[in-house]
């Protein structure tokens, strides 16, 4: 569902304002390499093509699903979204798929500023990766045990 860059810009501005941030704060806190003028032009829909890497970084900072931004910019559609679902915490989680506990974690993390916020989400991401690794290891052990039974 490709929309215009004006729609993407409006969505980005809406998210930024919901979080109570100025453009300057987004640039400083996110460490995204761009000027305030460039982000302002994006929000106004004046930029015709935006790097998918830039959109992903912005989505991660906003704790949004990167596919939402990439879809609005015309980079991915529903087929790609199904093929490559986003599930890791640090990579963004769709509002539609959040559990109440994840929503609370995001709310708490968003209450921090700058380095505290980055550190908080980094620790959450690390814990999620460790849990995923343990789950994969357990699944591998079950698979080995099942093959020995046969």
Image (spheres, rainbow, N blue to C red):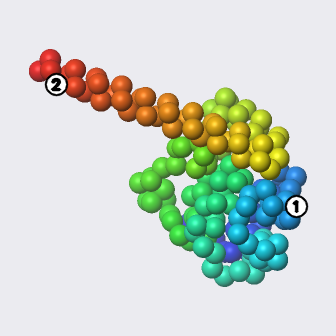
Of label 1 and label 2, which has the lower sequence position?
1
Crowd tier of the residue under label 1, counting other residues whose Cα lies within 10 Å: few below 14, some 14–19, many 20 or above: few
Q: Is residue 34 above or below residue 148?
A: below
Which residue bears the numbered disc 2?
A: 147
Q: At 83% from the left edge and 52% from the top edge, which residue is drawn? A: 18
- Give the quarter of the image for residue 108: top right
> 85 or 123, which lies in front?
123
Q: At 81% from the left edge and 42% from the top edge, which residue is drawn? A: 112
Crowd tier of the residue under label 2, counting other residues whose Cα lies within 10 Å: few below 14, some 14–19, many 20 or above: few
**Residue 133, label in figure:** none
Q: At 71% from the left edge and 64% from the top edge, which residue is drawn? A: 32
Indicate left or right for 116 with 129 as reference.
right
Indicate left or right for 92 with 22 as reference.
left
Could you tell me which secondary element the residue under label 2 belongs to? helix
Residue most extreme to the left: 150
Residue 74 visible at all:
yes
Which residue bears the numbered disc 1?
A: 22
- Give the quarter of the image for residue 2: bottom right
Q: Is residue 132 above or below residue 138?
A: below
Q: Residue 40's spot in the image, x, y percent?
A: 81, 73
Q: Could you tell me if the residues under marks 1 and 2 are in contact, i.e. CB atoms within 8 Å?
A: no
Quadrant of the snapshot with the C terminus: top left
Q: Residue 48's spot in the image, x, y percent?
A: 66, 82
């Amino acid at each position: 569902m490709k929309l215009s860059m004006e729609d993407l810009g409006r969505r980005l501005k809406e998210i930024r304002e919901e979080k109570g941030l100025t453009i300057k704060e987004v640039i400083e806190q996110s460490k995204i390499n761009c000027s305030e003028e460039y982000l302002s032009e994006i929000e106004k829909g004046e930029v015709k093509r935006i790097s998918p890497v830039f959109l992903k970084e912005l989505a991660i900072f906003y704790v949004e699903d990167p596919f939402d931004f990439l879809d609005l910019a015309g980079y991915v559609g529903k087929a790609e979204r199904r093929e490559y679902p986003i599930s890791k915490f640090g990579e963004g989680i769709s509002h539609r798929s959040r559990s109440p506990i994840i929503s609370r974690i995001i709310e708490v993390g968003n209450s921090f500023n700058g380095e505290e916020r980055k550190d908080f989400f980094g620790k959450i991401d690390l814990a999620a990766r460790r849990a995923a690794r343990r789950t994969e290891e357990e699944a591998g052990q079950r698979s080995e045990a099942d093959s020995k039974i046969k």
